[in-house]
Amino acid sequence: MTTFLNIVVIISTIMFALSLIGLVYRIIVGPSLHDKIVALDAFGIMLMGIIALTAITLGSIYFIPIILLIGILAFLSTIAFSKYLERNVIIDDDRDNDE
């Protein structure tokens, strides 16, 4: 890698690490459950960014499935938590029990 790219990757990694520290604080202390869920989703995105920077640094394409898996899991967990906050259930049972 070039020197400029090394500097950019190092600065980006430091910024991601500082952001993760702030997000962990928000996940633990957050004033409401909604804030904690948003921070958890942002944590997943920042984690994907750090893994992408690691892949750039190592010059490897094998981290891409890991990034995709974390993205899918973060999305599904955000949807599940949001649905739980809305209705207090994750899986709706809309069948009529008349039978």
Image (cartoon, rainbow, N blue to C red):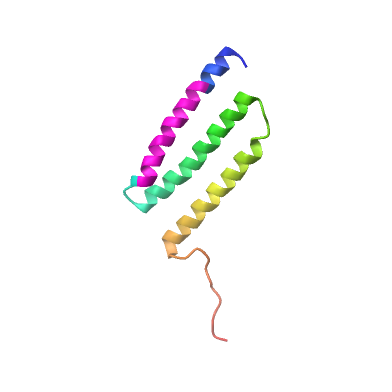
Q: In this view, does 57 lie above or below 62?
A: above
What is the span of residues highlighted in magenta in the rendered image? 10-28
Q: Is the magenta stretch mostly helix, strand or loop?
A: helix
**On-image quarter of the C terminus:** bottom right
> Residue 79, position in %: x, y?
51, 54
**On-image quarter of the N terminus:** top right
Residue at image point 63% right, 25% down: 58
Residue at image point 49% right, 51% down: 78
Q: Is residue 7 above or below residue 58?
A: above
Outermost residue on the bottom side: it is 99
Q: Nearer the viewer, residue 35 or 28?
A: 28
Outermost residue on the top side: it is 3
> Residue 32, position in %: x, y?
34, 51
> Residue 86, position in %: x, y?
43, 61
Task: From the viewer's perspective, tell me whether residue 59 is left or right of residue 40.
Answer: right
Task: From the viewer's perspective, tell me whether residue 63 is left or right of residue 31.
Answer: right
Residue at image point 43% right, 49% down: 37
Outermost residue on the right side: it is 61
